[in-house]
Amino acid sequence: MKKISTLAFVIFIVTFLFSAVIFTPQPVKLGVTQAPIYFKPRLTQTTSTGCSPTQIKTEYGSRFLTNDIAFFKFSVWTAMIAPSSRPLTTKDKTETKMIKFPEEGIPVLMYHSISTIPGNTLGVPVKEFTEEMEWLHRQNYHSLSLEEFYQALANKTPVPDKPILLTFDDGYSDNYTKAWPILRQNGFKATFFVTTNSIGSGMMNWDQLGDLAREGNTIGSHTVHHLDLATLSYKQQENELNISKQELVNRLDISVQALCFPSGRYNKTTLELMSKLGYKLGFTTVPGKVHLGDDLLTLKRVRISGGMPLASFQKQFP
Ligand SMILES: [Zn+2]
C-alpha cells in the first residue's frame, strides 16, 4: 500500500514538472478561472500585454498546484484539436499536382458585386459568396492568375489540378472590402475588370486596385465608359480600349493583357483593335467553359448569380 502511494506521488510530481517545463500560460482572460485558455509553448511567449512571463507564471502558480492533472489533460486535448481549428490558408504549393489543360475545360467564373441587391441577381450576397469559395477550397480547386491561364491556353503550360479562373466585372468597391478578404482566406486570387472612368465613388479606388495587384491579383480593362462597343465607331472603340489600358498601366504600374466586353458586346472592329493594342485575352458573357484551342479573344464564362443555390453552383464544376 505504501509502495502504491509512493508511486502515485512520483507520477504526480513528474506530471507536474512536465506540465510546468513544457507549457507556459498566456496572460489571457484571467477573470475566467476555469474557461479553456489557449496555452502556448514557452518559446512563443510574448510580453506584449505589459505582463512579464514571470508575473504570469506566478499568477497561475496556485492553480497549477491544485489543477495540474486537469491542466495536463487540457494541454493534450488542445494539441489534439488544434489542427482542426486552424483557419483556412493558402494551399501548400508542394502538394499541388500539375496537369495538362483539362479536356472538360476550365470554368471562368463571372461575378459582379458581392452584396445583396434586392431584385437584382448581379449582386451575390456575402454569405452565398463565402459558401461558394469555402466549397471550392474544400474541393481543392486552384485559382489561376490571368498569366497562368494565358500560358496554359497559348503555350499549353501545365496548370494546377482542378483549375478555375475567378473574374469580377465593373470594379465595385465591395470586391475589395468584401470579396478579397474571403478570397484570400481561401487561398484564391482573382482578375478584376474595371471601367477607368468610374474609379472611386462606390467603385474601387486606385489605392485598392494597387493593393489587389500587389497581392497577386490581376487588373484588366472593362473600357473607359462601359459603353456597347458594337455600336461605336472605330475611333471611339480605339479610345475605349487604348485609354483604359494606358491609364491602368500608368497608375498601377502593371501590364494589362485582358479586356472584358461591357455587357458582353463587341464586333469585328473590337477584335482587330485588341490585337493592334496588345490585348491577349478577351472575355465575353457567353456561357460555357474554356477549352484548349478556343479563340483567345472571345472566351466564355460561367455567370454566378445572386440567389443561386449552392447545389446549382456545384454543378458548374467537373
Ligand atoms: Zn460590366
Image (tube, grey):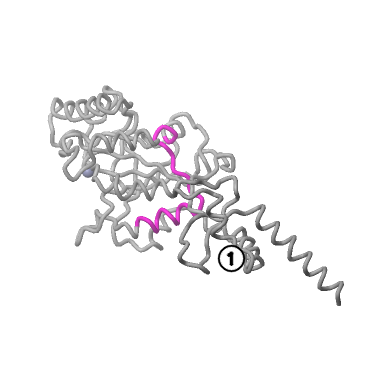
How far across and how far down the image is residue 172, in percent?
A: 23, 45
Left/right of residue 47 with respect to residue 263 in the rendered view: right
Q: Secondary structure at mark 1?
A: helix
The quarter of the rendering in which ligand 1 is drawn is top left
**Which residue is found at the position 50% from the left and 32% from the top?**
157
The magenta region covers 129-149
Kind of residue at disc 1: Arg
Q: For residue 116, what is the image quadrant?
A: bottom left
Q: For residue 95, what is the image quadrant?
A: top right
Instruction: Name the one closer to the observer, 277 or 298.
Output: 277
How far across and how far down the image is residue 176, in percent?
A: 30, 44
Q: Which residue is mark 1?
A: 63
**Which residue is found at the position 35% from the left and 49% from the top?**
302
State whether residue 64 is above or below residue 217.
below
How far across and how far down the image is residue 38, in percent?
A: 53, 58
State whether residue 178 is above or below residue 238.
below
**Which residue is found at the position 87% from the left and 72% from the top?**
3
Picture quarter with the N terminus? bottom right
Instruction: Name the one closer to the observer, 149 or 126.
Output: 126
